[in-house]
Amino acid sequence: MSFPPTNVSRRAFLAGLSVLGGATLLPAAANATPVLRQAPDGGAGLIRNPEFGNGVMAGVPRTDGATLWTRVGAAGGTGSATGSLGTGSLGSGSAGSSGGAGGGLALVVSKREDLSSPVLAERVQVREDADGTVHFDVNGLAPGETYYYQFRGNGGESSVGRFRTLRPADSNEPVRIGWFTCQGFEEGYYAAHRHLAAEDLDFVVCLGDYVYEFTKPGVRGVTTNPFPQTIDAMRDKYRQYRTDANLRQMHSQHAFIPIWDDHEFRNNYSKDGWTFPVVSDIDGAVGFQQKKQWAWQSWFEHMPVPRFANDPTRTYRSLRVGKTVELFAPDTRQYRDRQACGDSLDHIVCAEADAAGRTMLGATQKQWLLDGMTRSDARWKVVANANMMMGMVVADNGTRAYMDTWDGYGAERAEILSAAAQSVENLVLVTGDDHDGWAGELWDTGFAPGTPSGAQANAPGTRRAGVEFVVPSVTSANTADGGYTSSSDNTGGARAEEINRRDKNPHVKHADMVSHGYGVLEVDASEARFQFRTVDKLNPNSGVETTKALRTPAGQSVIETL
């Protein structure tokens, strides 16, 4: 079934489904005659009585399919995959304790929400050595269509998921993308995901920090899994986060593209280590390389992403969405040099930040991004960017806010933005990590004319290069919450700092250091529009409000208020 006609909103459509009993969660067993109880969907060999406590996901959509994901096992942490295949257990104790395949499920894909007349019915393999997860690349689907899918065992079925394939190559239709970042589990509730699930979107992008390696006190209590030191403890982070029904619902409604940042492993890490001090004995109990290997492994297991056969830890990729958008999703963490000037937490003037040769992307990925942006003939070039690109000065002497952003890699930033200013039309960056909400105009050095530069080499720019929207955190502490390490109310200080930042950075057109939520980007032939959606992170039943709506006309790297 396709989406309803354009004169019926998808929100109303979903509301209608809920009246029918939550059709997006409707198991096939609720049908009078369950679909496909033969061939791959029946008979010997399916896992008996499987649980699907972590939900379902469709990842990295293509014009002809996507990567479909689930996990066999109960919801929550400190548990491995459960179920049985024939007379044998799928897993006992640690799901990663023994290698190889764990058993089979049936996968059904259909254009119909009741899963009748399936376009695909396959047996898929559950990997015991990958925490009981399933990754199956579906091919042969039609572009720009909505599909429904379900995993089934012998006596148990997953919820029904939905995703849309990418629009066909000749499509000029508008494209709508949802964005979220920084969702510390203990620090708030996921009302944002409940509302994100109801948006009419082509897909959703996570801009990093899907899970956090540390634990801090919060409204959901304190967990016993801070700084996980084993592969199974790292897997527990994903299992725990997906106990949230709103997060599972969002994943079941939209295709998903995740990028990682630092907290999936360790705050502010670079390719050589981390600069932040060890904050507890357990934090330093396992060496950097081993923890990094486990962090990557658990991320790939628990995200619906295909692997690059010749580069198994590569995550950067691009997606073409008709003629309207080409999306670039770089990895700003795995290849970067150490942060400049010791990655001081204090706001500093740091000449090293603009030193030639320092890299955030690495040579290979940087060339991939430059080639992709300059050669693309898509109307809009959209970059899913984990760390803020625009400069952020906090004092008259040119003091910059943080060295972990592109402010600490000024020469490479200037190279990329200079190329964009010269050769890329309609560049939009959507960024995570900062926890606060921003919108700014990108200049060829990262700074607009009139920005104080101090002792740093990057002077104010002379050419416009694009625009940037920075999505606030879903729950993780922002400036108004007291910042990274505090939970005290600092709303007054945050509002004062918004004024200071706009005064020092004429390229900044919107600053909100108080709100939490998510973003929606809609682009068509004439303009790009970005809406900041705000929720109360402390209220699990929070409504949603659009607190700021901005536009960028095609051919102009400017931001205007709608």
Image: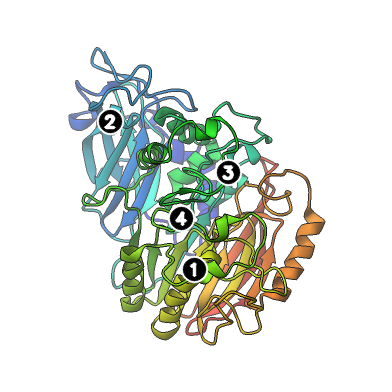
Q: Secondary structure at mark 1?
A: strand
How far is the residue under mark 2 from the one under mark 4?
26 Å
Task: Say whether residue 23 is left or right of residue 172.
Answer: right
Dividing the picture into quarters, in which one does residue 79 lie?
top left
> Where is residue 253 drawn, in percent x and y?
45, 47
CA neighbours of label 2 inside 10 A, class few (<14), some (14 to 19), many (20+): many
Task: Say whether residue 226 is left or right of residue 112.
Answer: right
How far is the residue under mark 3 from the one under mark 1?
31 Å
* Residue named by callout 1: 429
* Residue named by callout 4: 205
Residue 277 image label: 3
Q: Is residue 239 above or below residue 48?
A: below
* Residue named by callout 2: 126
Residue 495 image label: none
Q: Nearer the viewer, residue 551 or 478?
A: 478
How far is the residue under mark 2 from the one under mark 3?
39 Å
Task: Say whether residue 23 is left or right of residue 86.
Answer: right
> Where is residue 234 drawn, in percent x and y?
45, 33
Q: Nearer the viewer, mark 4 or mark 3?
A: 3
Amino acid type, label 1:
Leu
The residue drawn where x is 28% and y is 30% is 126
Task: Say whether residue 355 is left or right of residue 91.
Answer: right
Dividing the picture into quarters, in which one does residue 383 lie?
bottom left
Amino acid type, label 4:
Val
Amino acid type, label 3:
Pro
Dot 4 and dot 3 residues touching (CB under 8 Å): no
